[in-house]
Image: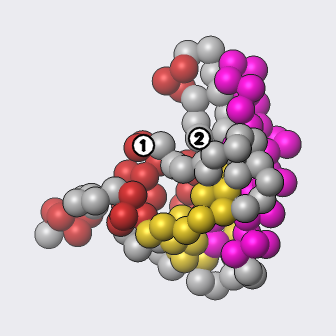
Amino acid sequence: MTDQELVQKAIEMQKFSYVPYSQFPVGAALMCEDGRVFTGCNVENAAYGSTICAERTALLKAVSEGCQEGWTAIAIAGTGTDYCWPCGACRQMLYEFAPNLRVLAARADGSFVERKLSQLLPNGFGPQALK
């Protein structure tokens, strides 16, 4: 799957978002080296802390379906004119499983830029720090 196709999957996931508070749908698509893609959307809640981002939805689906390694890229797409980057909580959750993950941050028009997760979370830590 190309990067553009992965971004398109993230854009398609926006339609499933539940965003009555922010009115800002976000979609995500997490690609694994075996070709599987796990998708997610953001789901808001009146208790704001209970809201879950699209990236974590995709991550939780991957882990709950037995894919805890081999993640190669995640595309994140919002509806704004700026690139849609993962929040700090998402960065930490993704780092737990794939510190070198490629992050494709997309805008509403489908254009995107790429960064390594390790660039977005410098000096991050995960299970390897406990060894």
Residue 120 % position (x, y): 39, 58
Q: Is residue 91 left or right of residue 42?
A: left
**Mark 2–mark 1 contact, CB under 8 Å?**
yes
Q: CA distance from mark 2 to mark 1?
A: 9 Å
Please say whether residue 109 is one of the residues in the magenta stretch: no
Q: Name the residue rendered at 73%, 80% in the picture.
A: 2
Q: Is residue 49 left or right of residue 80?
A: left
Q: Name the residue rendered at 75%, 42% in the picture.
A: 79
In depth, the one of 83 and 88 nearer the eye is 83
Quarter of the rendering occupied by the N terminus: bottom right
Q: Is residue 13 left or right of residue 56?
A: right
Please say whether residue 13 is one of the residues in the magenta stretch: yes
In depth, the one of 74 and 84 nearer the eye is 84
Residue 100 % position (x, y): 41, 73
Report crowding for label 2: few under 14, some 14 to 19, many 20 or more residues within 10 A (C-alpha): many
Q: Name the residue rendered at 73%, 62% in the picture.
A: 111
Amino acid type for the residue under numbered disc 2: Cys
**Corner quadrant of residue 30:** bottom right
Whether 74 is drawn above or below 16: the answer is below
Picture disc at residue 8: none
* Outermost front residue: 81
**Corner quadrant of residue 34:** bottom right
| Residue 31 in view (yes/no) | yes
Residue 130 % position (x, y): 16, 63
Magenta region: 3-31
| Residue 68 in view (yes/no) | no
Q: Considering only order in the chain, which callout, 1 or 2, is on the residue closer to the N terminus?
A: 2
Q: Which residue is mark 1?
A: 89
Picture disc at residue 53: 2
In depth, the one of 35 and 73 nearer the eye is 73
Amino acid type for the residue under numbered disc 1: Ala
